[in-house]
Image: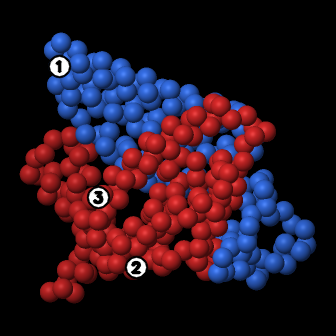
């Protein structure tokens, strides 16, 4: 039974997401469209499972919610800070820096989420992953202390993502 | 003050916030003089700038009696795709050395963009364009 379920739905959360996405695209909830959304939600992950073979087996959706809210708050705070930097700091005084973040995360999905979070937060852009996937290259727009920036990212985002994927 | 008037004002304020952040993003794009710093401007427009504009659109749709949830989807797709395009621009910058030299990674040999596979190394030595 469990094997049949895994064969039918290799990514249960993707199935749910596609069904909700399809229903939202219709802009009103009708039984027919929900059923069609579920059909799409089963067919699309099933058809594309070749390109996403490994599912993270431990993923806590419950811990994902406070994390998303925290990231949204950080995006808004950082936006104002970066807007102020753009307006007030002249080019000659701007201190951009590369920072290298040694990664404790191993799951590709977790690293993708961390890199996405870093890029969405204004002021930092994640640029590259090392060839073995053990560190992340991040560009910071303006910082006086690159090491402190690295520690903030590790403590604020990576530690929480470790919780989500454990 | 009816809800319609309040909603219209709220939509107007969101529009102003969105337009303001987009303007700052564009200013940043013009002002910064280095390719990597320039990359920071669009990531800002992509989040709060567009977010506030979509919020205005949604508020207005609810006020005018035609509720719409498409904006949530636009937001979700933007949040998923924006980091990928930023990542690719950054990779091109590193690849073509349009930026400060990158530091050594911790725990590995090199960054994946600079990692040239064995069969391509000869091309590199022949002076072929990368």
**Left or right, residue A158 beside residue A141:** left
Q: Chain of mark 3?
A: A
Instruction: Give the quadrant of residue B75.
Output: top left
Residue at the spot 65% in from the left edge and 31% down from the top edge: A88
Label 1 residue SS: helix
| Residue A123 image position (x, y, % from top left) | 58, 48
Q: Quadrant of the C terminus of chain B?
A: bottom right
Q: Is residue A50 visible?
A: no
Which colour represents chain A? red
Q: Chain of mark 1?
A: B
**Left or right, residue B19 beside residue A58:** right
Kindly identify which residue carries mark 2: A53
Return the residue nearer the eye: B69 or A110. Answer: A110
Check disc 1: other Cα within 10 Å, few if <14, some if 14-19, many if 20+: few
Q: How is the image coloured?
A: by chain
Q: Tell me, yes or no, whether the two marked residues, 2 and 1, touch with CB atoms within 8 Å.
A: no
Residue A144 in the image: above or below residue B48? below
């Amino acid at each position: 039974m469990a094997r049949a379920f895994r064969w039918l739905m290799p990514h249960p959360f993707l199935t749910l997401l596609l069904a909700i996405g399809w229903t939202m695209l219709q802009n009103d909830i009708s039984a027919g469209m929900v059923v069609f959304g579920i059909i799409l939600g089963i067919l699309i992950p099933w058809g594309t499972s070749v390109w996403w073979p490994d599912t993270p087996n431990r993923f806590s959706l419950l811990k994902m919610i406070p994390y998303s809210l925290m990231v949204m708050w950080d995006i808004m705070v950082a936006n104002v800070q970066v807007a102020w930097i753009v307006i007030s700091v002249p080019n000659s005084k701007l201190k951009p820096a590369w920072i290298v973040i040694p990664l404790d995360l191993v799951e590709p999905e977790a690293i993708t989420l961390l890199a996405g979070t870093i890029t969405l937060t204004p002021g930092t852009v994640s640029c590259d992953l090392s060839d073995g996937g053990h560190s992340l290259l991040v560009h910071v727009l303006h910082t006086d202390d690159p090491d402190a920036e690295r520690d903030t990212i590790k403590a604020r985002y990576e530690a929480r993502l470790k919780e989500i994927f454990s | 003050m009816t809800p319609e008037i309040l909603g219209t004002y709220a939509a107007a304020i969101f529009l102003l916030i969105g337009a303001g952040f987009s303007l700052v993003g564009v200013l940043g794009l013009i002002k910064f003089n280095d390719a990597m710093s320039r990359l920071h401007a669009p990531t800002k427009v992509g989040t709060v700038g567009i977010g506030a504009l979509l919020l205005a659109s949604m508020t207005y749709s609810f006020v005018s009696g035609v509720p719409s949830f498409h904006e949530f989807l636009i937001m979700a797709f933007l949040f998923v795709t924006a980091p990928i395009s930023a990542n690719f621009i950054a990779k091109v910058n590193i690849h073509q050395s349009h930026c400060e030299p990158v530091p050594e990674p911790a725990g590995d040999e090199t960054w994946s963009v600079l990692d040239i596979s064995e069969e391509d190394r000869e091309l590199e030595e022949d002076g072929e364009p990368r």
